[in-house]
Every structure is written in structure tokens, then in C-alpha cells.
Image: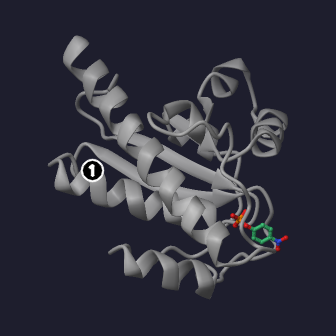
Amino acid sequence: MKHKKQPYRILFVCLGNICRSPSAEAVMKKLVKDAGFASEIEIDSAGILGYHAGEKADSRMRSHAVRRGYKLESISRPVVPADFYDFDLIIGMDDRNIDDLKDKAPDLEAVGKIRKMTDFAENSLYDYVPDPYYGGADGFELVLDLLEDACSGLLKQITASDRDN
Ligand code: 4NP
């Protein structure tokens, strides 16, 4: 973590901010809290689209998540220009999210903050987190499987870089 005094800030981003990124937010918050880093790492989520702004996470996503102990409490909001200054790391779920984030980034420094969630995966061969919105129960379970794996890898990376600096 580069900023020792300020919290390290991570923003998870998907298309609608009602399925994948609110789940990533909840999974990462739990991992960070359980590892004792809650005051050092801040986590939020947002959507490329503002279409679902003001809504809770999708009820199917919430019910799959709660069975694994994650309560999805975030309210959907779109990515805003200030996010590219306020956050240290901006993590999209698929290549389309990454392209859209790069289009929205105000400068090269902001582009440098953008990563893909699956780049942090340790046990999965997926190279994106598939959108579960139009599919069935399996898709929501897959999202949680991929996020648990990738968030664990992400936490290891950011806490290891803290020890190195
Ligand atoms: P998410 O899923 O990007 O994981 O939140 C979606 C939610 C809604 C829509 C698309 C994807 N939508 O088109 O409304």
C-alpha cells in the first residue's frame, strides 16, 4: 500500500453495479475485516451505467451471497470522474468494463489504476467474471466463486506490497 497514513482505496466496477461489483465489495470487505485491515483499506463499488442508480443489489445476487455470509448493502451508483482521483485501484469485472473505464479515465495516471478482477485469481482459469444478470442460479454461484478466489489474491498482493515498501 503506497499511502501509509491514508487508507488504500479500492473501487470495484461492473456494468450495472447490482450483481458483480457489489458482491466483490462485500467479499473484499469481509476478507479485509477478518485480516484486521479494516482501517487501512477502504472499498466501494460503482457501475459503468447509471441505469440502476439508487437500487439495492439484485435480489438473486443478494440471496446467493447471504448463503455464504455476505450481506450486500451497497446502493448502485455510476462511476464518476472523481473516482479516478479518489481511488488507488479501480477493478473491472470483464474486458468491456476495462475498455469503458479506460474511455472514462481523465489521464494516464488514472488509466494506470485500472485492473481486471481475474488478474488477481489464484485458482481459476477464467479471464473475466461473467455477467449473471440474464442467466440462472449457476451464474450467481460462479460469480461468488470467482470473486472469493480473486479477492483473496488481491488482498495478498496489496498487503505484500505494504511489507515491501
Ligand atoms: P452487473 O450485472 O454488471 O454484474 O451488475 C448487470 C446488471 C444489470 C444489467 C446488466 C448487467 N442491465 O443491463 O440492466
**Compared to 29, does 39 lie above or below?**
above
Above-or-below relation of 123 to 133: above
Name the outermost residue toward the left: 36
Q: Position of residue 115 (x, y in %)?
A: 61, 32
Quadrant including the C terminus: top left
Q: Name which residue lies at 20% across and 46% down.
A: 37
Q: Residue at x 51, y 65 (%)?
A: 23
Total marks shown come to 1
Residue drawn at (61%, 46%), measured in percent from left and top?
A: 83
Residue 53, position as x, y percentages in the image: 71, 75
Disc 1: which residue: 32
Ligand 1 located in image quadrant = bottom right
Q: Is residue 36 left or right of residue 21?
A: left
Colouring used for the render? one colour
Amino acid at circle 1: Val
Q: In the figure, is residue 18 to the left or right of 38?
A: right
Q: Secondary structure at mark 1?
A: helix
